[in-house]
Image (tube, rainbow, N blue to C red):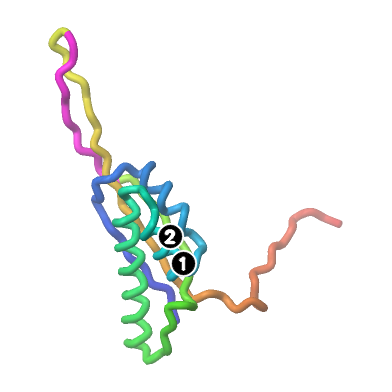
Amino acid sequence: MAEARAQARYVRVTPQKARRVVDLIRGRQTVDAGAVLAFAPQAAAETVGKVLASAVANARVKADRDSEPFDEQEMVVAEAYVDEGPSLKRFRPRAQGRAGRILKRTSHITVVVAPRAPRGTAARTTSSRKV
């Protein structure tokens, strides 16, 4: 199984609030991540859940295309990040005839799922320190 990604662009939620939700699922199994998002109280959790479901569906399509077995239990959230999209500029009236600028921020939410690495093949960390 290869990794698969999904992206939601121009989502009307601030990147700071979306990152709080994305941090909850990074590194988790996709089944567990879906359960966490289903019960998360943040409004961005619904959108992140849809992106996660889309990434899993993309992985299933890739596996079917390549005639490989697919097991959702073996998939983990390899990467999950939120980039800042364009901001909508709006103005509110303020005191003494002034105008206050309001930035309605948007986000680009990306989720990458990949099969879990076997336990025996964990990546080694090399130290640059001489012994």
Q: Position of residue 6 (x, y in %)?
A: 33, 65
Q: Residues within 10 Å of mark 2 (few under 14, many from 20)?
A: some
Q: In the rendered image, which quarter is residue 104 located in?
A: top left
Could you tell me residue 27's position as x and y percent? 51, 62
Q: Residue at x 43, y 70 (%)?
A: 31
Marks 2 and 1, how far apart in space? 6 Å
Q: Residue at x 28, y 58 (%)?
A: 8
Tell me where residue 32 appears, x and y as whole percent: 46, 67
**In front of the other: 12 or 122:** 12
- Look at the picture and state if 67 lies above or below 7: below
Task: Assess whether mark 1 and mark 2 are in contact (beta carbons under 8 angstroms).
Answer: yes
SS for tag 1? Answer: helix
Q: Which residue is mark 1?
A: 32
Q: Which residues are magenta?
A: 85-95
User: Which quadrant would the C terminus be assigned to in this image?
Assistant: bottom right
Q: Position of residue 72 (x, y in %)?
A: 42, 78
Q: Residues within 10 Å of mark 1 (few under 14, many from 20)?
A: some
Q: Identify residue type, mark 2.
A: Val
Q: Is residue 61 left or right of residue 119?
A: left
Residue sitting at 18 percent across and 11 percent down?
95
Q: Is residue 25 left or right of residue 121?
A: left
The residue that mark 2 highlights is 36
Quick one: 13 or 81, which is closer to the camera?
Answer: 13
Count of marks overlaid on the render: 2
Asked whether residue 13 is drawn in magenta, I would say: no
Residue 96 located left or right of residue 32? left
| 87 shown above or below 39 | above
For residue 88: magenta? yes
- Taking the spot 23% from the left edge, 29% from the top edge, the residue there is 102
Label 2: which secondary element: helix
Mark 1: amino acid: Asp
Residue 55 lies in what quarter of the image? bottom left
